[in-house]
Image (cartoon, helix red, strand yellow):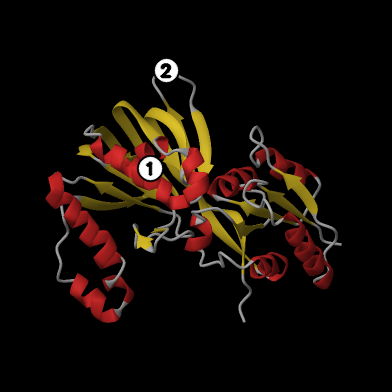
Amino acid sequence: MRRAALIFNPVKVDGEGDALRATVRDLESEHGWGETLWLETTVDEPGGAQAKQALAENVELVIAAGGDGTVRVVAEAMRGTGVPLALLPSGTGNLLARNLDLTLDDVDNALTTAFTGENRPIDMGVIELRNGDTKTQRHAYLVMAGLGLDAKMLANTDDELKAKAGWLAYVKAIGTALLDRNELHMRYRIDGGATHSVRAHTIMIGNCGSLPANILLLPDASVDDGEFDIVVLRPEGFVGWVQIVVKIFWENGVLRRTTAGRRLMGLTKEVRALNYLKGKELVLKLSQAEEVELDGDSFGKATAIRTWVDPKSLVVRVPADG
């Protein structure tokens, strides 16, 4: 009999545990699955060890119940195994679930998808981080890697306030990051091509394009196209930020969603404050150590990174057609 494992963050599902277990029991019985293996994350083991344990016990499905951090860590351990990962979204971001158009607030629907859905292979990003002469760290991510504003924002976020106020906790952190006048001075190379030098405020490397609040940062990004979509933000004062806001919130968020809007977009010019790039591998060196974030979590500072696409290396569960 098929068996699933459910890896859950007790902080994210606190107060819902009994109801969740009852729903899982009902659905596994209804759809012919054996008793689910329940594995709880801890501060020291946030999901990777639990995923490896589940795989060692030959489960045929892993369900990740938690926020973006839990999903990323579990997916990192499952990369390349072929075992499907189902998402039970919780927390504030749920970035991968949003980009896969999965249900965010319906436990029954999410678990039904887990036990009866289809498998969809998607890309993962792999990144190597180095800070000076320190040992290179390697991680995998699902949605975005970032340096600059978003990474500084996360580094300045009060975790206790975030737990209480959700995305409102980022408002103060954004203000702190915007006051930081330090630019990123970097040299980069895409897919082994020419080396470019640039000064920028922020660089985002995306496997997916959508952020919370319906923000479409990378409109051409796709989770299974074998490429990254990269955006470099280079605002020069207030006007530059206005150009970025118009481009992201108006053009990407409104005009792009209709045929008439897309025609209007064809009449607009690209702006210097925001540049889009594409590639399968990015090598980047910085003049000084800068904060790095992966899927909404801070990973400290790095002076050099190399990141590449691992195409269709993760299988995720999505709703069955029809």
Q: Position of residue 226 (x, y in %)?
A: 45, 55
Left or right of residue 128: residue 42: right
**Mark 2, residue position:** 133
Image quarter in which the N terminus is found: bottom right
Q: Which mark is residue 146?
A: 1
Q: Quadrant of residue 20?
A: bottom right
Indicate whether 237 appears above or below 65: above
Question: How far apart, in angstroms, are the residues tagged by discs 1 and 2?
Answer: 22 Å
Quick one: label 2, few (<14), some, or many (20+) residues within 10 Å?
few
Q: Residue furthest top?
A: 133
Say whether marks 1 and 2 touch (CB < 8 Å): no
Is label 1 in a helix, a strand or a loop? strand
Q: Position of residue 166 (x, y in %)?
A: 47, 51
Indicate whether 191 appears above or below 59: above
Is label 2 in a helix, a strand or a loop? loop
Q: Position of residue 75 (x, y in %)?
A: 60, 48
Q: Quadrant of residue 225?
A: bottom left
